[in-house]
Image (cartoon, rainbow, N blue to C red):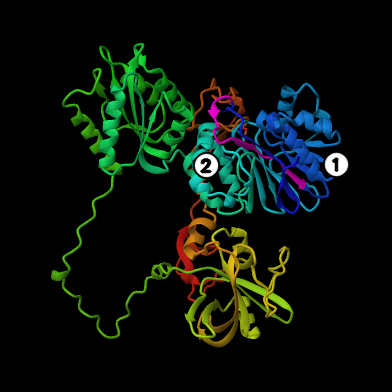
Amino acid sequence: MHCTRKIHDDLIWVGADDRRLFCFEGVYGVPEGVSYNSYLLLDEKTVLFDTVDKAVYEVFFENVAYALGGRKLDYLLISHMEPDHAATIESLLLRYPEARILCNAKVKTMLGQFFLTDFSDKVDLVKEGDIVSVGRHQLTFVMAPMVHWPEVMMTYDLTDKTLFTADAFGTFGALNGRLFNDEADFFVENIDEARRYYTNIVGKYGPQVQAVLKKAAALDIATVCPLHGFVWRSHFGDFLEKYLLWSSYTPEEQSVMLAYASVYGHTENAANILATKLVERGVKVRMYDTSVTHASYIVSDAFRCSHLVFAATTYNAGVFVTMENLLHDLAAHNLQKRKVAIIENGSWAPTSGKVMRELIAPMKNIEFIADNITLKSALAAGQTDALDTLADAIAKEIGPKPVAAAPDAASAEAPAAAPEGTILPVDNGVFHKFSYGVEVLTTRVDGKDYGCIINTAGQVAAGDPKKITISCIKKNYTCDMVGKAGNFNISIITEDAPYALFQRFGFQSGRDVDKFADVSWTDRTANGIRYVPEYTNAVLSCEVIGMEDLDTQVLYIANVVEAKVLSKAPSCTYAYYHAHIKPKKNPAPEQKECWVCRVCGYVHEGPDMPDDFVCPLCKHGKEEFEHVVPVIKEKQKGYICTICGHFEPCDGELPADYTCPICKHTKEDFEPAEQ
Ligand code: FEO
């Protein structure tokens, strides 16, 4: 029986969960399962975005048939040829022989390698920047080599601003009925498996991920559809922020990952004592026995933590096998920029420390923070001093910092009062310390609906009728309309609201567009004014009883004449919007002179490349590399709008009456910036 979910009216998830898979890619245990996502777009043409692993083919084909509803399949769009997404391509094309294949040239080559059937006469090739129209939707393509294979490409739906990201932004774990990120407590329940997925699957290819993130930063993204895990329709900036850290090998937290390999428990004992000393000094420690925990979990936490401690016994005149495997794995995943300490053990000829150093030293930007600590069979009396010294050194870098003593209030002298007429400084930052909610203000004049985002609604009187005030930027069309209408509604926005809601009501003018065009709801309160029933938890209908001209804003005082609670979702504050909903700027990776492989995207840093150079990823030679010499662009001074992100070039001060051309906020909401 089919099991599908709607993403948009014309975009259906037709994937499936697999909870019986023991090892993903034959390596990574997935105790919480995994999802294989596939999406069907129903436009004038029908487009299926990728297929699924053969383990879930049965429900997948039922899903596709159900979602098509008897229509033919026009296109199979292939983003990635790894069999967890491509194994059922041949079976799909047998069922839908009229379907054509949209893919790039590298995918076409791999189709010929994976399948005996020759599909070449069905293929329509696309390349970076091409646009394919399938009706209302226009699709364009972003090549993403080595995220995770060389043929990977992303597809951007220019119409609905949906980015199909292939493996990027996926996670381990079955969906379990949830499809959207906001249906799960992602950053509590799922982030560890998302990190383990990223670091182990594409962790090696940080520069390639950075390159594609840079391209994606130019796109206006409303929905993100990866091939595993959740569809992102809100708070994507929070996940993107993690990707920026992981792909640049920047630790997520100042903490210690302590991994040990111990045969009879003596090395483990030293590791436990060190962990205790670290915790006593206020350092957060994550600890693993390499013989018990699969390396994929330890690799994941090595990407998370700033400091790594490896403790291992000597074995076969080398290092114990599970530690050796782990260190090879960390090197293979390109881990870098970490501080490292080593504890070795050996009863007659300790060699594990030397071997561990040799395995770690080639990783980039590794700093050993102490000499190896050597145990002879077990921690000897007096050797705890060495562990204390190591714990002190780590705690000095990442432990809690002492708080400066407060001055003695009794002995402090009161400052002299400022002379009359002195103009005292007013720091605009103070006004960002208030805790505001955010609301959609709506009204109606001459049969036309208006709305804008405000963060100024508040109750000012509890009597009957209750009174609230709002203030509204004068240049906002809705401000004038409230004055004309004499009444308005306030819809209180909730934390799960997508950025698109703020874009709809905040970043365009009612003079130019109908902000209610294309919405699926038509709800009105008794006063006939529209309100926003989605991503809101309450609506209030108000009648204006007074107003005050505040120069840049108008303050309206109003009686509440109708009010109802719409949901239990928590209200979104202005601070929450900035921290979690407003997309984070993707800082452009620093440009250095380098050589970039045209086949797989591998980056060889530096101005020179030997003639016999062979790409370590795809094995192509120097002739396939492009020499990239960065163009140094001078940064432009200006101001950035903290509300909508608009950058206004300006070498001096913004004019006193300046307002943002996008969201109409005044210069107080701008910060100095360079771009
Ligand atoms: Fe989910 Fe690279 O395959």
- Marks counted in the figure total 2
Q: Name which residue type carries label 2.
A: Pro
User: 261 or 218, which lies in front?
Assistant: 261
The CA distance from mark 2 to mark 1 is: 48 Å
Looking at the image, is 371 positioned above or below residue 547?
above
Q: Residue at x 50, y 48 (%)?
A: 187
| Residue 211 part of the magenta-drawn span | no
Which label is found at residue 153? none
Q: Earlier in the sequence, mark 2 or mark 1?
A: 1
- The residue that mark 2 highlights is 630
Q: Residue furthest bottom?
A: 546
| Residue 36 part of the magenta-drawn span | yes
User: 257 or 500, which lies in front?
Assistant: 257
Question: Quick one: SS at disc 2?
Answer: loop
- List x then y, in percent, for residue 6: 71, 50
- List x then y, in percent, for residue 310: 34, 27
Location of residue 35 by image quarter: top right
Q: Quadrant of ligand 1?
A: top right
Whether label 2 lies within 8 Å of ligand 1 gets the answer no
- The residue that mark 1 highlights is 72
**From which residue to which does the magenta span run?**
26-41
Q: Residue furthest left?
A: 411
Q: Residue at x 62, y 47 (%)?
A: 178
Q: Name which residue type carries label 1.
A: Lys
Q: Are marks 2 and 1 in contact (CB under 8 Å)?
A: no
- List x then y, in percent, for residue 118: 81, 24
Location of residue 36 by image quarter: top right
Q: Residue at x 25, y 41 (%)?
A: 280
Residue 540 in sight: no
- List x then y, in percent, for residue 174: 60, 39
